[in-house]
Amino acid sequence: MIGQSTDNKWERLVLVYSLWDGPKCGIVTYQDVPHFFCCPFDDEAQDFPDFYWLSPLPPELFSSAYKLLELKKVDRRQRSEKAQAEIRQAESVFKELHMDEATAFKAKYELRWPAHLEGELYFPISDEWEIRFFDDSAAS
């Protein structure tokens, strides 16, 4: 592991837009604040870097992000049709969101499958990933 964990707490991703051998773009909480995250492909290295670019969401989107996170805490297989519709509606708020380069910063991370999927052979659905961030000063 690289760097010090910011709070040593595993969290579930709120929303994932892009998935390639793991989440590459979406919404996550970082130090309890909703952020847009992105891990763009590095053409020179021909690989994805080992950090995310993070940018705080505009404050007016916090409540939507927190609502989406709460809705997704219920296991996908146990969600009602109403909850699924609420999730789709909440996700639509973020479809046009992009990185704010003025506030963006790098943060090292570690991803894992949730404990209830350990040993499973299928690839986790996007909102089942768990993430932990490390001190961003380690991501130079």
Image (cartoon, helix red, strand yellow):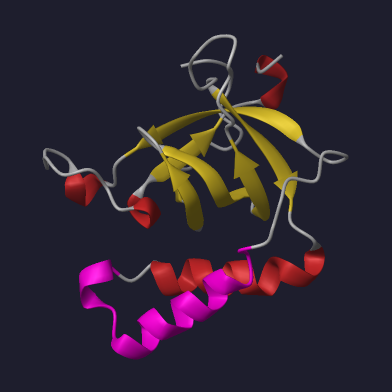
Taking 29 as reference, is 127 left or right?
left
Residue occupying the point 54% across, 70% down: 91
Taking 72 as reference, is 42 left or right?
right
Q: Is residue 128 above or below residue 140?
A: below
Q: Give how far across and how far down residue 52 sits, in percent.
A: 60, 32
Is residue 31 visible in the rendered image? The answer is no
Q: Residue furthest front?
A: 43
- Viewer-proximal residue among 111 and 40: 40
Q: Residue furthest right?
A: 102
Q: Magenta residues, as a range? A: 75-95
Residue occupying the point 28% across, 79% down: 79
Q: Give how far across and how far down residue 70 sits, in percent.
A: 48, 71
Residue occupying the point 80% across, 46% down: 100
| Image-quadrant location for residue 10 | top left
Q: Give how far across and how far down residue 104 sits, in percent.
A: 78, 37
Is residue 30 visible in the rendered image? The answer is yes
Residue 86 inside the magenta-drawn segment: yes
Residue occupying the point 29% across, 85% down: 80
Q: Is residue 73 above or below residue 87?
A: above
Give the prevailing secondary structure in the magenta stretch. helix
Q: Residue furthest bottom?
A: 82
Q: How many numbered circles does the render carry?
A: 0
Q: Give how far across and how far down residue 124 sits, in percent.
A: 27, 47
Quadrant where the C terminus is found in the figure: top right
Residue 130 inside the magenta-drawn segment: no
- Viewer-proximal residue among 7 and 17: 17
